[in-house]
Structures are given as C-alpha cells and as structure tokens.
C-alpha cells in the first residue's frame, strides 16, 4: 500500500530583521525537546522535512519540530536583490525565529545550504545549539562555479543553460512548483563571498556529518568532520546530493544521534 507524503502544518510568519517575511512550521509537543530543521537550496521545509518523513519520525521519537522556509524559498518572501542574501542575514534569520518562539536552546538539523547555515549558527551562537546534524556539507562553496548570467537568462525565457553544474541546479530548482528562479539566483550571487566552513574554527558541540556515498562532495565533507572535535560521520548508502534527504537510514541515524544527547 502506498504511503502518502505527510503535509506540513500551516505556516506562521516571522518578520526578519530587514523586514523579510519568514514562513515557519511547528509540530509536536510544545514541551518536548525542540529540533530546528533547515532545508537545502531550492527546497523548502515541507519538501525537505515533511514530505520525506523526517518530521513524522522526529515527533514520534519525542521531539518538537520547528522549521523555516529560508528567505527566497517556499512560502517566505523571495527578494530578487542579491543584497538580501548574506550568510550573516541567514544566521540572523535563525536567531530571529528562535527568539520569536522563545527558544533558548535547540538541536539543529540542516541539509546542504541548511547545513552551511547550521555550521555558522553553531559557531557563532553556541549557546543556542546543543547537537547538530549537518548533511551534505562541503568544506567550500558547492555553488562557487554557478554561472548566474546563464541561469538568469534562462529564467527570463532564454536558451537552456549549458554549464553542467549550473544546469543541474537550475533544472532541479525549476522542477519544483512555486520556486522563484530569479530569487534563487540572487541568493547564489549574494552568498558568493560568504564565509565558508573553517576547519580551523569548527563547532564545539557534538556534530553528526552525513553525505551520500554517490555525492561528489563526500571527501570534502569527511575533511570537515575530521577537523571537528568529537564529531561522527555517516555515509548515506546509495545516495547522491539530490536524493539523500528521503533516505531512511539517514533519517534513522540522525534521530539516533539526537537521542544520544
């Protein structure tokens, strides 16, 4: 019998420090230990955490799940100005959400872009993060070679993108209903010079790193883990960067990691 994807709760909106509206989602016992879930590039809280079974299994394991659509994604505002997207702002969006929900401590799970943000949150706001699961995170910028000019021309009705990496990401983004391609391209541009995970200054909390066995960034993720004291690493079997989030072994390992705390 087929199992239908779980639907996310109705969003509640939080106002970021620069006025951008952030969609947030809250499920589970309000008194349970809270997990903040932050999705990857061109995804959303609903697609990354509810449709894949993460939210359901986290709640069953006794957690409260709080998630947000990062700016430029999902039901959040989608500014098309690269100046609206900086790592400082994405980290501040997380802080704003936690402040609004009156949470002074959470465990953090993030995938891809959400993991890059999570690294910075754990380092800059260590008093807020107990344990962190960072999935699909490289030791650099996976989109450094993204060709925004080609992507923007395509988004405005131009020819197909030729550059392989740019084409892969833009086709993935375009295939998800509701995505604003110009906003996502602005995000990539805004993060072009963003701080990268620094192996010399890693998180000090317990961290589980996880990356797909077929993901080209696997060695880079392993290097980050090796530089992070007390970390653990899980290779997601048979998965690449794009299809890792629905993996049940990935989900089970992350939930077991959170339970260790």
Image: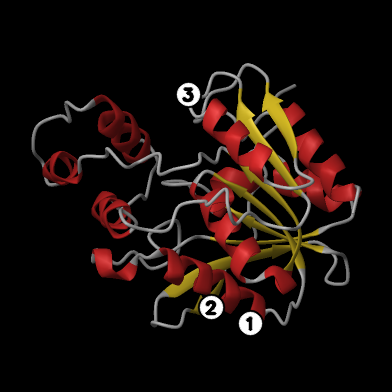
Residue 94 in picture, x, y percent from top left: 57, 69
Crowding at label 2, few (<14), some or many (≥20) Cα neighbours within 10 Å?
some
1 vs 3, front mark: 3
Q: Earlier in the sequence, mark 1 or mark 3?
A: 1
Residue assigned mark 3:
216
Please name the residue shown 54% across and 18% down the image.
214
- Residue at image coords 33%, 29%: 168
* Sequence-first disc among 2 and 3: 2
Mark nearest the camera among 2 and 3 is 3
The correct choice, above or below, for 130 with respect to 254 in the image is: below
Q: Identify the residue under disc 2.
A: 14
Q: Is residue 161 above or below residue 45?
A: above
Along the line of sight, which residue is nearer the eye, 101 or 46? 101
**Residue 10 seen in render:** no
Measure how far apart labels 1 and 2 are at the Cα level. 7 Å
Residue positioned 26% across, 51% down in the render: 185
Which element carries disc 2, helix, strand or loop?
A: strand
């Amino acid at each position: 019998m087929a199992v239908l994807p779980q639907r996310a709760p109705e969003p509640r909106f939080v106002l970021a420090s620069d006025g951008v509206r952030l969609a947030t989602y809250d499920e589970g016992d309000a008194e349970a230990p809270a997990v903040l879930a932050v999705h990857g590039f061109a995804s959303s809280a609903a697609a990354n955490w509810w449709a894949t079974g993460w939210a359901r299994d986290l709640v069953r394991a006794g957690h409260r799940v709080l998630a947000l659509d990062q700016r430029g994604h999902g039901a959040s505002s989608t500014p098309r100005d690269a100046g609206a997207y900086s790592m400082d702002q994405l980290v501040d969006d997380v802080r704003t959400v936690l402040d609004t929900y009156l949470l002074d401590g959470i465990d953090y799970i993030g995938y891809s872009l959400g993991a890059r943000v999570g690294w910075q949150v754990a380092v800059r706001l260590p008093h807020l993060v107990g344990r962190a699961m960072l999935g699909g995170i490289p030791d650099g910028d996976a989109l450094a070679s993204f060709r925004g000019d080609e992507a923007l021309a395509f988004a405005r009705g131009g020819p197909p993108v030729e550059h392989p990496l740019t084409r892969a990401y833009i086709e993935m983004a375009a295939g998800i209903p509701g995505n604003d391609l110009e906003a996502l391209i602005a995000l990539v541009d805004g993060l072009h010079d963003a701080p990268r995970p620094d192996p010399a200054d890693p998180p000090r909390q317990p961290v589980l790193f996880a990356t797909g066995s077929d993901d080209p960034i696997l060695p880079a993720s392993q290097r980050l883990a090796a530089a992070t004291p007390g970390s653990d690493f899980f290779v997601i079997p048979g998965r690449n960067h794009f299809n890792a989030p629905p993996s049940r072994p990935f989900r089970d390992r992350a939930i077991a990691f959170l339970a260790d705390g």
